[in-house]
Amino acid sequence: MNDPAGIAALFADPFLDAILAGRREGILLLDYDGTLAPFRDRRDQAVPYPGVVETLGRLPAHGPGRFAVVSGRMGAEVADFLHPARPSEIWGCHGAERLSPGGAPRIQAMPWQWEEALRRAFDLAAEAAPAGALEWKTVSLALHWRGMDTAEQQRLARHVGSLWAELARQTGLVPHAFDGGLELRPPGWDKGLAVRAMRRENPGAALVYLGDDLTDEDAFQALGPSDIGVLVRERPRLTLARYRITPPGELLGFLRVWADSMRGAPHEPRR
């Protein structure tokens, strides 16, 4: 769709109303960068919007109303940013890694051929990319160009994009554009993995997924008919999400209504 409905329509959604009124179990799935936190040129400075950690800390750790995070980052990074709020679990590396509180991360095994291909991709890109622009994630490789001038971004997109596209044709890896760079990963390893797993493991629960990036479209696509996809973005774009809210104001407003409802506060549909 072109521009999905806004926050008023979201609060009027009958599926969301059933969750907030306690008539149906709901689970909140949240992207991190661009959704819970603004983008930063330095990824280690991408702290959450003010109020996000406090509000998420009010959500239950288990059962209905809990939240999980689905991110392109490694799970431990997300856990550090959100502390002391504790997601029920974190799906890192676009769903290839699963991290539960107090546990060790579980990462999908990757065939040696793809691991070798990613190392080759790193070597190819390292010849053109500035120091610190490449991020090795164990199961994928990302090239970040946020904060660079437009000419440098375009140069990297053309040069490294061409090299990785050829390597992808040879190996079966898939290049994915995201807001601020390009990532190379095995086929089928995307945020839809997390959504499909959560749906299998929580029959009868409705999933509400909030995300901003092109990589979140795989998650929106994996949602079921009674699940809800919400694009968190200031400006509209083509998306499979049913609704769009803007950060940080509408985002925080939604999270606070969710938290209040999960703690037993009366809920009235917003029209």
Image (cartoon, rainbow, N blue to C red):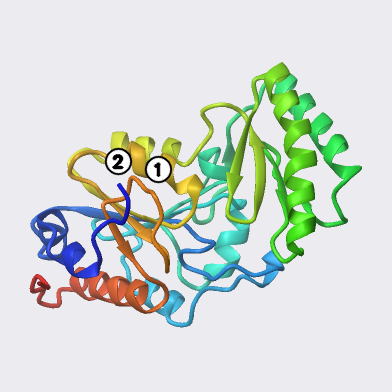
Residue 188 percent location from the top left of the image? 51, 28
Is the residue marked by circle 1 packed among few (<14), some (14-19), or many (20+) residues within 10 Å? Answer: many
Q: Is residue 113 visible?
A: yes
- According to the image, label 2 marks what residue? 223
State the image quarter where residue 145 is shown: bottom right
The reply, left or right, for residue 240 in relation to residue 149 is left
**In the image, what residue type sits under mark 2?**
Leu
Residue 223 percent location from the top left of the image? 30, 41
Residue 167 or 223: which is nearer the viewer? 167
**In the image, what residue type sits under mark 1?**
Ala
The reply, left or right, for residue 243 in relation to residue 162 is left
* Marks 2 and 1, how far apart at CA: 7 Å
**Residue located 30% across and 47% down the image:** 1
Residue 219 has which mark? Answer: 1
From what the image shows, is residue 118 above or below residue 143? Answer: above
**Residue located 87% across and 56% down the image:** 131
* Disc 2 + disc 1, Cβ < 8 Å: yes
- The number of discs equals 2
Residue 121 percent location from the top left of the image? 79, 33
Is the residue marked by circle 2 packed among few (<14), some (14-19), or many (20+) residues within 10 Å? Answer: many
The reply, left or right, for residue 173 in relation to residue 221 is right
Please, which residue is most extreme toward the front here?
Answer: 151
**Residue located 57% across and 60% down the image:** 78
The reply, left or right, for residue 129 in relation to residue 220 is right
Quadrant placement of the C terminus: bottom left
Residue 225 percent location from the top left of the image? 19, 40
